[in-house]
Image (cartoon, rainbow, N blue to C red):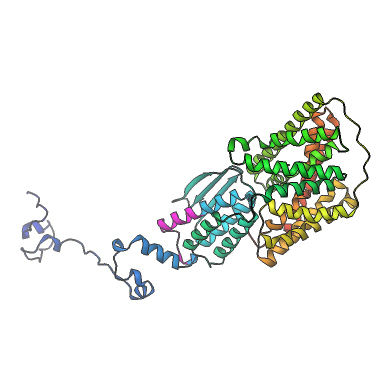
Amino acid sequence: MDQPRRGTQLDETQLDEPGSEESSLDPGEPTRALAPDIDEPHIDESDAEARPSLSLKLPSQITWAELSELKNSLPPSALVDTDATYLQDANAFLLRLGRLLHVQGTDTLRLEEALAACAARLGVEVQVFSTPTSLFVAVGDERVAQTHLVRVAPGEVNLAKLADLNQLIDGIARGEVSLGDAFERLERVASAPPHYPAWLMPLAFGISAAAAACFLRGRLPDVVLSGAIGLLLGCISLWMARDPSRSRVFPAVAGAIAGGLASWASRFFPVSDGVTTLASLIVLLPGLSLTVAMSELATQHLMSGTARFAGAVVSLLQLALGVALSRELIARLFPQAHPPLAMPPLPAWTEAVALGLAPVAFAVLFRARKRDIPWIIGTGVLGFSGARLGASWLGPELGVLVGAFVVALVSNLLARRLRRPASVTLVPGLVLLVPGSIGFRSLSSFIERDVMSGTEGIFRMFLVATSLVGGLLLANAVLPPRSQL
């Protein structure tokens, strides 16, 4: 029997199946009478009242603008991660937030915790893997997870933007910021102008170098020359930062300039070559990177810690190479060195002045907000005093554990009381304690073929870095910070 064509009518014989009861349909009834019922769209009245912009509309009639407006009007807890569009929006937000945190110098532990806190409030699952030069983010469960790779160049610490991002993360965690508002605030943070003019950065270089010369027991000529070389290096850094190819060789160039000028001046003026060179390079020494690397290794972030540690070692090698080349050149050009005249030591009050100015210079270099500078000064003074007190009890290498504990404890307390990132006061306070100068001295000893002194310096550098990390971890265990950053 021929099969009926679609759109034609069926007679009674075509409707009856063998062994079935006789059909009660009228022979003239069209085929659609046998098709399954199609549910008509049903709109609940309560939903229509709650979402007037979507009431009485079929799903195909809802525009993207209306759907986005509805999502942004709801708190993050009211959204569900089963919505593919919402999952894409959350994915884009977490990627953007992770990139900004990475560029502003956030370490791996804090970055991953911040993204995890935001994802938990947004109702999505996230897996984060961060290294100093890349960021992997997978959003969603195993069925719909999307993994993205973000290639990120290591950025400079910007404490002001970290504070703004911390406020955004706290707002999301408390359910006060919707996803749409979070995107807008992210863009405002990313495009915010710098808090300080460009000419202030070289001045901060010079002040920090002069203060470091005071801490290293330098004499007045050492302080003056260190400040002048630091100012020069700050100007050169602004010029070389405009071109990535030039910025890659800046550590070696800076080492050559500092070592050459200090070596030349020591032949004609009562200047200490070693103190001046080390003080003028204090900002460029990777002591903070070394400390962060040790902290990441201690918290089982092995890939990130190993990569950051290798980067710190390479930076030290570049600085040492530049200093060695310039010193050898000066020694060949000016073989006759004049013995320096004896200069009286600086009075004790100069160290107190340096201790007050150094945190201000570091606040400018790390781009902290102006209202945070008093807290940075206070934390730095307490940490430096704690390190000196600890050194009198435990020795200079283990004494920095007390200083790091004080800095981290005060920073965590301020973070809890003032609802600001602990990094705002922690980073500048640690710079006064970091072991970069010890590592530089040890490399200089190796270059001068003093293997015993170089080996001793390397061991001391690791011991100081371990003491710093121990103080940080102990303070976090005693008084954990409430903020993610």
Q: Looking at the image, which is closer to me, 80 or 154? A: 154
Q: Looking at the image, which is closer to me, 449 or 142? A: 449
In the displayed structure, 108 sits above or below 123; it is above
Whole-percent x and y of residue 467? Answer: 79, 48
- Name which residue lies at 63% across and 59% down: 163
Q: Looking at the image, which is closer to me, 324 or 120? A: 324
Is residue 478 visible in this depiction of the protein? no
- Name which residue lies at 59% across and 35% down: 245
- Count up the numbered dots: 0
In the displayed structure, 447 sits above or below 74; it is above
Asked whether, in this view, residue 19 is left or right of residue 68, the answer is left
Q: Looking at the image, which is closer to me, 436 or 332? A: 332
Query: Farthest front residue?
Result: 268
The image quadrant where one finds the C terminus is bottom right
Q: Which residues are magenta?
A: 78-93
Asked whether, in this view, residue 388 is left or right of residue 280, the answer is right
Whole-percent x and y of residue 401? Answer: 81, 51
Whole-percent x and y of residue 287? Answer: 74, 44
Q: Quick check: is 448 in the magenta stretch? A: no
Q: Quadrant of residue 406?
A: bottom right
Q: Quadrant of residue 437?
A: top right
- Name which residue lies at 75% across and 33% down: 320
Q: Quick check: is 83 in the magenta stretch? A: yes
Characterize the magenta stretch by its predominant secondary structure.
helix
Q: Quadrant of residue 256?
A: top right
Is residue 413 visible in this depiction of the protein? yes
Whole-percent x and y of residue 465? Answer: 77, 45
- Name which residue lies at 41% across and 59% down: 83
